[in-house]
Image (tube, grey):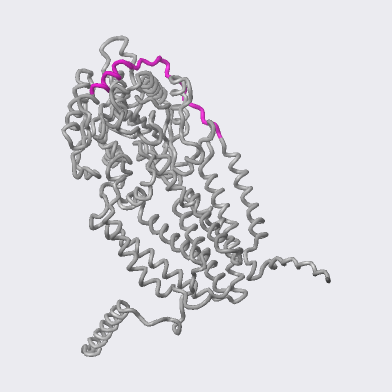
Amino acid sequence: MASQPPPRRRRRPRRGTLARPVNGSLYRATLLVVMVPLLLLAFTVGRPAPLAKPPLPGSFDTASALELARDLSTDYPNRAPGGAGAIGAVSWFKAQMQGYGLKLLPASWHQHVPGLGRVRLENLAVVAPGPPGGDESIVVMAHRDDTGAGPGASDNASGTAALIELARAYAQPETEAAARVSSARRLVFLSTDGGAFGGLGAVHFLEHPPPYAGRVVAVINLDAIGGPGNPSIEIGGDASRSPNATLVATAVARIAEQAGDAPRHVGFFGQLVDLAFPYTLYEQGPFVGRGIPAVTITSGGDRPPAPFGDTPEALDEARLGQLGGAAQQLLGSLDQGFELAPSTASYVWVGGRVVRGWAIELVLIALLLPVAVAIVDLYALCRRFRVALAPAARALRSRLLFWLFVGIVFTCFRLLGAWPSGPPRPPDPGIAAADDWPVMQLLALLAVALLGWSLARQRLTARRPITAEEELAAYTVGLVALLVVALLVTATNPFALLFVLPSLHIWLWLPQLRIARAPVRLGLFVLGLCGPVIVLLSLALRYGLGFDAPWYLLELVGIGYITPLAFFIALAGTAAASQLAVTAAGRYAPYPDAHERGPRGPLRELVRAVVLTSRARRRRVEATAPAAPTG
């Protein structure tokens, strides 16, 4: 029997052809450019030094603060804004401050609160005057309310009690010993309302600055400092900014001195996520978002403690004394006359050091460059081989119009009151509005979206087998559109490239795998979704939302916390991703030519008839109109 010849090895497609369209060498060469901003980033790392300790030792009265926290949470366990408990808590706070020579300054307003309707809220401020002629202020604040689901002993009767004790320390001196307690700046002790519902009191203080506040140079927020959790600080803001690094370093040092260990804060990647998607449940957020240095001292972690179990009996006296004493020492350090420049920059903490935000932005933008070069080269290759891109662009246009239609319908549902309404502030994940899905409204939105898709899909349904060139054109147009979305993201918030770059770098190789099996292509596409999924995972895991994270994200869009511009950029990215998805799944069809289109459906015929009738009527009116007189 004659021997069989050895099987021939399958030759790899030649680089720069339609079978191997992505230029990997160009991509890898451009990737080396990232080394320059990485090297620059290494030279921006610094270690901010904390301010010196105050000359006088701390005198925080832990026993008195514990008694105050228990009294407030026992007498008024339901302090939700607008209720009888909230009114009683106001009277209770005023009673605690009587007889200390400090003037109480109230500020009330009415506002719609999710889950509560339109209610009356009230901030209470106590001011310790600084030196004559000084206009700089340090604000120490704590929200007085709770969600009403529990006594709120730690969140935030403990913070309110510590605020009262700190204010009493700066009361009008009546003895020679007490006369030594004076301030170099004006001190504002602010008890806010609506803090458990998105920091409404802090926002009102910023939007309607009282004349006594002057120029705020630093803010210390006390929230849930009586719980059993480890001490921590919160520094996230409503914008891609960070508080003054000296303030944070000083807060860390004072807490470490009192608690015996440095407080925890979110790690490097979590801080990047917070800069890319600014979100916080604490009241330092509005101040940091407006460039005012602010930190929150807490024992609650990223999310305030659950109301169930937050009882007066569960208060941790040792923790309350540690964090209350740390707040007093921090206030003393800030009040020694040192300058604290308002922060408009960003940074990320890494083991006691800070990495400048602008250097991180340069690295993210540099990581966009290799993908951009490879996509432009892919587009040029298609033009060189005369691959028709227009049908793929029209298919993408149809998908984009569909997703814009979904966004417009979602906005109309919002105007009709289908979604929870309120100020553009993050709702507390523990309230009903955050985890009660409006099933009927969402089903109605889905039904309208399906109706719109039934119209759009008539031009996107496969009528014949597509060629390899048409498939490549679909990938190319989808990647170009995704690159445009990335450029829009760069223009609005470069940190948000964190959510786009993984998709671009992974999906870039989809055209290279056109001959691979469908599961391989779909696996690569699913892997590229890791970028957008970061937001959902952050809400689900860090903030305990679990499977409610998708609805909570939609709610942030509905109330306006996520801006319309960011929402529609996300919709454009979804349209580009959907084109890549259907192509990877083998379901793509180019936009048909005129001879390939089927008959119009009844709805399209109706729309066409209305348009043609309106156009004919306008022409008849123009034809019968008298001619304009000439000069």
Q: Main secondary structure of the magenta part?
A: loop
* Of 582 and 98, the residue lying toward us: 582
Residue placed furthest toward the left: 84
Q: Quadrant of the N terminus?
A: bottom right
Q: Name the residue furthest front.
A: 1
At 60% across and 69% down in the image, what residue appears?
A: 380
Give the position of the C terminus as an image quadrant. bottom left
Horizontal side of 602 relative to 364 (left or right) equals left
**Left or right of 45: which side holds 2?**
right
From the viewer's side, name the closer residue of 297 and 434.
Answer: 434
Furthest-top residue in this view: 176
Q: Is residue 128 visible?
A: no
The residue drawn where x is 34% and y is 17% is 60
Classify 509 as above or below 261: below
Q: Residue at x 55, y 67 (%)?
A: 476
Between 405 and 228, the one lying in front of the other is: 228
Give the vertical position of 268 relative to 513 (above or below): above
Q: Position of residue 5 (x, y in %)?
A: 80, 69
Nearer-the-camera pick, 543 or 284 = 543
- Name the spot of residue 312 as percent of width and height, x first: 28, 23
Residue at 52 percent of width and 40 percent of height: 356
Q: Give the magenta part as a residue range.
A: 46-71
**Residue 594 location, x and y as percent?**
44, 83
